[in-house]
Image (cartoon, coloured by chain):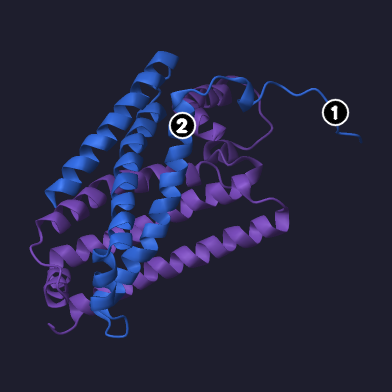
Chain colours: A purple, B blue
Amino acid sequence: MVRDYCHGRFYRGLLVYGLGGVFEMSLSSPLSRVLGSGSAKEGTDHWWMQRVTAVGLLILGLWFLISIAALESFAHDDMHAWVREPMNALMLLLAGLTIAWHSALGVQVVIEDYVRGPALKVVSIILNKFVHLFLGAAAVFAVLKVALGAPL
Amino acid sequence: MNTEGRPLSPHLTIYRWPITMTLSILHRMTGVALSIGLIAFVIWLEAIAFDAVPYDSVKAFMDSLPGQVMLFGWCLSFFFHLSNGVRHLIWDSGRLFEKSQANASSWFVIIATVVFTAAYWFMV
């Protein structure tokens, strides 16, 4: 949790780090400095994509809730017809993928914080990726089947 | 090396529990709840798309009391996670870091969550 509160200094940190690269001698190559990856080789990618998907979900999540609230019937054929609308199908595809991505990133942090032991931790993190990939693919598959298939 | 009995720096339990800590753990808990909600979301999509997952059974469960409690929980979790997520994005821009601001924004998030959830739940 502590890490969450440190990220606010990211931009200032980036500035200081950038200037440091200009004024200080460093043994790392200019490429590795600009990539900012450090020894973890991952850099800020996890953190950054969590933010990007969060902003995406702000839009997609509110779209979903408002659209669902506007529906008059939740009967099977009405829902099928609703998902079949191209704009709804497109937004549902984006929503399914973005939720799965954001959720994968979030649950990974929870695993990293609470799962003890390196072996169990690595297995849990890989399993987490598989489960989320499966859920994202399943959502895409279902929406595509409805959108590209025949009306009910 | 003996690591027992060493002095420790003051830990969580020594502080009066601040509201910011409640929000911090709630952000994580609602996130996990919403991840479980993702499974329900996918089952719902599969039920719409495929006959193998009976849509009427899924709908019947969601209309039942346990189903409604779960939906309300996800609704509450969504609005909390969204409101507090925006708070995190503001922090990422380097703003609202003062203790008084963090406390005030905590209450703002709680009020926003209650208002949004109530408005949405009774609107549908």
Q: Is residue A66 above or below residue A89?
A: above
User: In the figure, is residue A133 to the left or right of A57?
Assistant: right
CA gap between label 2 and label 1 equals 30 Å
Could you tell me the amino acid type at mark 2? Thr
Looking at the image, is B3 positioned above or below residue B57? Answer: above
Image mark 1: chain: B
Rendered location of residue A107, percent (x, y) = 50, 52
Question: Dot 2: within a 10 Å radius of its alpha carbon, few (fewer than 14), some, or many (20 or more) residues?
Answer: few
Residue at (38% x, 53% y) in the render: B34
**Viewer-closest of B25 and A128:** B25
Q: Going 33% across and 50% down the picture, which residue do you hit?
A: B73
Q: Residues within 10 Å of mark 1 (few under 14, many from 20)?
A: few
Q: Quick one: SS at disc 2?
A: helix
Quarter holding the C terminus of chain A is bottom left
Q: Is residue A18 visible?
A: yes
Residue sticking out furthest to the right: B1
* Quarter of the figure that contains the N terminus of chain A: top right
In the image, residue A8 sits, relative to residue B44, either above or below, namely above
Measuring from the top left, give residue B15's x and y in whole percent: 58, 20
Residue position marked by numbered label 1 in the rendering:
B5
Residue, disc 2: B22
Residue A113 lies, in percent from the top left, at: 60, 44
| Both marks 2 and 1 on one chain | yes
Direction left: furthest residue: A72
Going 45% across and 26% down the picture, which residue do you hit? B20
Image-quadrant location for residue B70? bottom left
Q: For the point 62% across and 47% down, which residue is it?
A: A114
> Please, what is the three-letter code of the amino acid marked with disc 1?
Gly
| Frontmost residue, B60 versus A109 | B60
